[in-house]
């Protein structure tokens, strides 16, 4: 999810207004969220129920480095960095 409309259109990410992202962040709906270059980017917890809990892998692309750092801390057993 991202508040950057151009990024959403280019990558297939879900676009959301900054205010919605901040509200969802307060409610704990993200595995990780960061502000990068003035735009918000977040990885939804929906991944846990849609893919990971069913034994499926989820590939997330075009992720800011700060999100990867957070996921390494919070979800180390789920994260594999591909170059």
Image (cartoon, grey):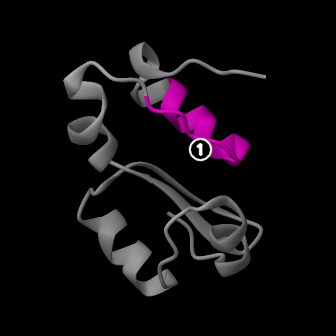
Q: Is residue 67 magenta?
A: yes
Q: Which quadrant of the view contains residue 77? A: top left
The extreme top residue here reads 77
Q: Residue at x 20, y 39 (%)?
A: 49
Tell me: residue 29, above or below residue 79. Answer: below
In this picture, which residue range is highlighted in magenta?
A: 58-72
Q: Residue at x 43, y 86 (%)?
A: 19
Query: How far from the left and from the top, in percent, is residue 75?
Result: 40, 25
Crowd around label 1: few <14 · some 14–19 · many ≥20 (10 Å):
some
Q: Residue at x 41, y 24 (%)?
A: 57
Q: Residue at x 56, y 40 (%)?
A: 60
Query: How far from the left and from the top, in percent, is residue 33?
Result: 49, 55
| Left or right for 51, reference 14 | left
Which of 76/60 is in front?
A: 60
Q: Which quadrant of the view contains residue 55? A: top left
Q: Mark 1 — residue?
A: 67
Tell me: residue 16, above or below residue 60. Answer: below
Which of 52/20 is in front?
A: 52
């Amino acid at each position: 999810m991202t508040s950057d409309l151009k990024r959403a259109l280019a990558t297939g990410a879900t676009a959301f207004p900054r205010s919605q992202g901040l509200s969802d962040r307060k409610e704990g709906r993200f595995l990780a969220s960061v502000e990068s270059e003035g735009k918000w980017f977040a990885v939804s917890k929906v991944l846990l129920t849609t893919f990971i809990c069913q034994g499926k892998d989820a590939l997330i692309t075009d992720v800011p480095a700060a999100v990867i750092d957070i996921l390494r801390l919070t979800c180390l057993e789920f994260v594999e960095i591909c170059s």
